[in-house]
Image (cartoon, helix red, strand yellow):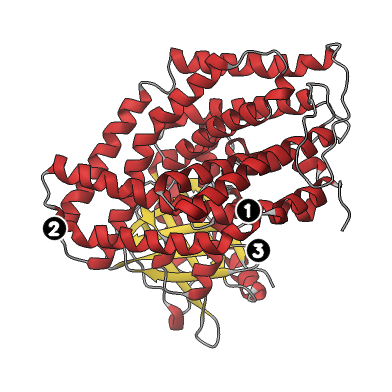
Amino acid sequence: MASSRISLVFSCGDVERVRLAIRQLASPLAVPLPRQGILKLLDTFDWALERSGASLLLHEYRTGTQLILVGPRLSVFEDLPIANNKWINVETIEQPFLRRSLSEATHQRALVVQASTPARGQLFQFPNSQGMRVATLFFFELPEINRCHILLVTRRGYSSFQHKLSEKIFAALMGLDIKVERKDPFDMVLGDHQRYKKDYQSRFALEFEPSTYGCIALGQALSSEQHRAEINAPWIKDHPDPEFLHDLRVALRRTSSLIKSLEPLLGSIDTSWFRSELKYFMNATSPVRDLENLGTFTSKQLDAIKCSPEVEALNSKIARDVSRNYDELAQLIPSPRFDNLISSWGQIARKSLSLALASTPSMNALGSTNGQAENIEVFPKTRVIESARVLLARSGTTLIRKARKAKKLKTAESLHSLRKEAKTFRYLLEFYEPVLEPARTRRCINSIKKLQDALGQHQDTFVQMQLLEDLCSTYKIPKSKVAMVFDVLASDQKIALEDYRKEIKLFSGPTLFREIQLATGYRKK
């Protein structure tokens, strides 16, 4: 009963013959209406979506834009009121099922057009015997890889219809005696650069046993994140894209956080210079990220208000400056300084692994009965499961202290500090996840993500309002002319605070320690 998706590519030299063959497939009662336009392939690099097997397509034509979400269990189509826009925000989608499906898959992250290629193409729609549109066929050219592409998508529950239609397509193409390959164009674009989707996963995943030395697990984590940073960096220069930048920043942040929170597992290894360099590159990538976020927000407002010369001018200038900032960032990433960072990254990872050969005695570190971390020493050769009980409790203590402070003060600074601590605690949970109670740990991680989303939205709106004020002065745009943008930001900030109040309960008292004890097996249900 699953929806079907067939992807075929062939030489551009055969385009006219294939076009004619496809036209002849339509019955007299179902002649497809061709739509000339641009088809863009979407890939969010959000691996919740990738693991689900779903694919996204955006088709732009003269009078509108169509979004298609297809996967093993669903196939949804919707016309969108946008055009010539590189961003789609989940909240703008009217169809509840599609909006909810995308939200669950992408955690409200914007969907960015990836491998965007101008393409001359046509859209064919095929109805069943009852006249219901159940299959859509895209036929278009991709000059970037010198191929033409056929994509056939059939709605869920119409597998027999799809089977008959695909048989006709294959028969027509075989009759033309041309070479047709079952490939995905986006995979081909990556393949031309000797890269693969799985290489860019930002999801943190390690495998080790509870008896593994902590220094070994940490070395594996550092090596994994070094690889992630190293392969994402060139794409910032060759294919400037917020998702590659995001995954690079995740690798930098997670590494910095792990080194700080797992410092006892590093023994005498000096990481001071390396941590300062990590901070330098995180700070260097922040401006373009903040500006790009504001650009996404103003694009959304521009779509909503339809006509505002000032907002349109603001959005245009932001887009120009984002491009300029990427050009400047490309001079730094990659660069000799960045190469030194990567080299040091690898050295620290190897040193951490080599600590397993040192003579440091293994310590059986245990947490206290009330969940508080006592003055127990954690060494590089402390077993992973034992260090988890101590270091998670220590991090949890700090998180609760900052949660209580934020609850009392509710300033931007205290909320931002809580956000960073929540992120540190989540990274620590993800690091220890292989040796913790799976279901309990995953629920705790998901709760932290919800808290982070609320705090992140609050911090983003705070930064965007400050940045917007500066840009209005720089671009000489009166604030009164873009007052509606400030108003929406202020409204979003209030909503974020409401969400924060709903999610903070777990992190304000002994409940968190109980979750830690249950996850580490120190306390039975």
Res. 262 in view: yes
Q: Residue 217: which disc? A: none
Indicate whether 361 appears above or below 118: above
Residue that protrudes farthest toward the front in the picture: 408
Label 2 or label 3, whichever comes before in sequence order: 3
The x, y position of residue 520, in whole percent, is: 82, 45
Depth check, mark 3 against mark 1: the one in front is 1
- Real-space Cα distance between discs 2 and 3? 49 Å
Depth check, mark 2 against mark 3: the one in front is 2
Q: Residue 507: which disc? A: 1
Secondary element at tag 2: helix
**Residue beneath disc 2:** 480
At a point 53% along the width and 14% down the height, the residue shown is 273
Residue 159 vs residue 208, the one in the foreground:
208
At a point 34% along the width and 45% down the height, the residue shown is 463
Residue type at tag 3: Pro
- Real-space Cα distance between discs 3 and 1? 37 Å
Label 2 or label 1, whichever comes before in sequence order: 2
Residue type at tag 2: Ser
